[in-house]
Amino acid sequence: MSATKLHQRDYRPEMRGTLDGVRILDLSRLFAGNVCTQMLADFGAEVIKVEPPEGDTLRAWKTEGISTHWKIYARNKKSLSLDLRNPRASEIIRALVPSAQIFIESFRPGVLEKMGLGPDTLLALNPKLVIMRISGWGQDGPYSQRPGFGTVVEGISGFAAINGFADREPVLPPMYLADGIAGIYGASAAMIALRDVELKGRQGQVIDLPLLDPLFSILGPQSANFRLTGKVKPRTGSRSTNSAPRNAYRCNDGRYVSLSASIQKMAERLFRSIGRPDLIDDPRFRTNADRVRNADALDAIIGAFIAERTQAENVAFFEAAEVTIGPIYDTSQILEDPHFIEREVIADFPDPDMGILPMHHVVPRLGGTPGSIRTPAPRLGEHNRSLLAEIGIDDAGYAALVASGVVHGEAIKA
């Protein structure tokens, strides 16, 4: 283990981001909604996570008994724990809606309406409200009532079919790809809709955000290519069907590097650097199209060269030759890498359970109005009292809500 340490950063509760004054009621569960509101919270939005009595599902995703997912994606947020099956809880939500600019939910289509919180009701209470409805498949269409987990979406979208190796089964992503992309799209959509309200004076609107559409949108021109050729894109492992060489190569220390020479000058530079200038005029490798057709032979030559050196040696060698290469890191290497540390791509923050918690910093980086990490992820129901006081619920009323099972969370013990 290197002596290099991550930068230790303090929470900055005094900072106010460019979204200061924007209140978001977030009734979503799991990953997409939490990614969306974490991004907005980092830039100053007041995000009120409305959680069920057992808490948001992310709280249950634990490692060594610690809810690391929750700690990262609920930073800068507040927690209000309500039993939304109780009609009194819906009344509380309706009372908070006039103070909000954005409302987010991820129930199956139709559930919000059954709770008495459909878009017509919400917009009647607050005509300027932006309502984001996250689901697996969208608010309409033949699949709208199907369970919308990201895994199923990653399969049906076409992503899994092109991911992996030709002689193996399709590979689903080892992380929450569909949810994460939807969350990022969601943050953009919320800001677009809010701009329409604030700068153009228009009414609020409903954002229909399924997990399927954003993931499908980044897969490239698969449909157009199929229409042109009648051929489905094959699984090619780490290779590209558009350029060569491009692959992951094994080093002699068991680690890997990723190398890409997608333009002609880079390919020629690569051939010279490995002592094979003859490959430049080799008919198998003369053009990019030639190299794609003969990728097996090309990878054998490059792979043999790389296999003689360690990961670090390969990176140093090819960087000196100005050939595009990079190490394929695991997490242990990321935590020691000087670029990640100096740019604070990841940094250590104080945490009540772990002492310090490594997590990604604010993304994206705005030079004039940067975001900040101001508070840790909230305890369940931590902000019950203060938020309910805003809508006129005094101590006696609060005690009654607790006794009736409408309000839950740690704060009721105070």
Image (cartoon, grey):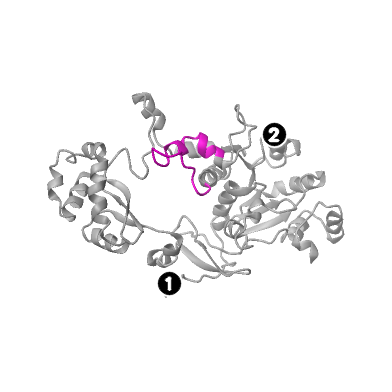
Q: Residues within 10 Å of mark 2 (few under 14, many from 20)?
A: few
Which is more N-terminal, label 2 or label 1? 1
| Foreground pick, 254 / 135 | 254
Q: Residue 345's quadrant in the figure?
A: bottom left
Q: Is residue 194 magenta?
A: no
The location of residue 182, given as percent across then percent down, is 53, 43
| Foreground pick, 137 / 343 | 137
Q: Residue 141's quadrant in the figure?
A: top right
Magenta part of the chain? 152-176
Circle 2 is placed at which residue position?
Answer: 110
Question: How many numbered marks have been drawn onto this rendered protein structure?
Answer: 2
Q: Residue at x 26, y 46 (%)?
A: 299
The location of residue 369, given as percent across then percent down, is 48, 59
Amino acid type assigned to the residue bearing label 1 in the image: Met
Q: Is residue 232 left or right of residue 133?
A: left
Quarter in which the N terminus is drawn:
bottom left
Q: Is residue 301 left or right of residue 240?
A: left
Q: Residue at x 53, y 42 (%)?
A: 189
Quarter in which the C terminus is drawn:
bottom right
Kindly identify which numbered label has been placed on residue 166: none
Q: Residue at x 79, y 54 (%)?
A: 407
Q: CA distance from mark 1 to mark 2?
A: 53 Å
Circle 1 is placed at which residue position?
Answer: 1
Amino acid type assigned to the residue bearing label 2 in the image: Gly
Q: Is residue 230 left or right of residue 151?
A: left
Question: What is the magenta segment's predominant secondary structure?
Answer: loop
| Foreground pick, 297 / 151 | 297
Q: Is residue 18 above or below residue 7?
A: above
Q: Is residue 323 above or below residue 158?
A: below
